[in-house]
Amino acid sequence: MHGFAAGIADVVDLRHMIDVAVEDAARLMHARQAAILVFADGGLVGAASCGPPIDGLPRSVDDPTWSSMLAGGSRTSAHHRADGCLAAVIRGDSATSPCVLTDGIGQGNGNGARPIDVEAVRTGVGLVVVGGRDGMADAFDDADAQRLQNIADQLAAGMGRSLLHRRVQHEAS
């Protein structure tokens, strides 16, 4: 797991981060298929997959099949799905601590620096889904669910940084 966290620790580009993370998640979970989706600012802002496609993934956070899992306010554990896949929510609100950033010039010195509200960035939510055990028992067990939730928790920090970087770039343009 340490190698997974280190692999995404310095990545600020969201698409690059999830491209790297989806392959690592599949490898760590011994899964033939994996997908990572990230929702923010009212829509899907990033998606990556490897292996055969996973059917039924959400296209929005209010997808009726997934909304109860994605809308949950607290950290949850990974869920076993009827199709044999295992899914965990990536909570952006656990990724950053409350703070206000400026454009690097400073605040309150009359130079027009605008603070960036990190609270608005913290609303991102993601999903990591794996399926198809590779060379192991067909079903994911409780230890696998904990491992996938640990992966999701590691992704939360990276997702928070990536969404914040995205917001800073948007504010700067």
Image (tube, rainbow, N blue to C red):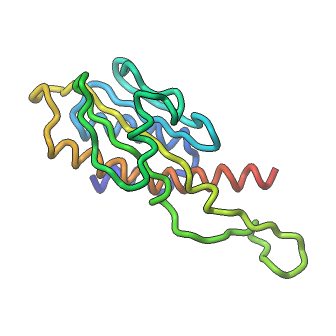
- From the viewer's perspective, tell me whether residue 110 is left or right of residue 26: right
Of 79 and 128, nearer the camera is 79
How many numbered tags mark residues here?
Answer: 0
Of 116 and 69, nearer the camera is 69
Q: Residue at x 71, y 63 (%)?
A: 116
The picture places residue 11, in percent across and down from the top left corner, at 52, 51
Which image quadrant for residue 35? top left
Q: Residue at x 49, y 53 (%)?
A: 92
The picture places residue 3, in percent across and down from the top left corner, at 31, 52
- From the viewer's perspective, tell me whether residue 13 is left or right of residue 33: right
- Look at the picture and state if 100 lies above or below 75: below
Q: Residue furthest left?
A: 137
Q: Residue furthest bottom?
A: 109
Q: Residue at x 14, y 29 (%)?
A: 139
- Look at the picture and state if 63 lies above or below 1: above
Q: Residue at x 58, y 46 (%)?
A: 13
The picture places residue 168, in percent across and down from the top left corner, at 70, 56
- From the viewer's perspective, tell me whether residue 31 is left or right of residue 162: left
The picture places residue 141, in percent across and down from the top left corner, at 13, 38
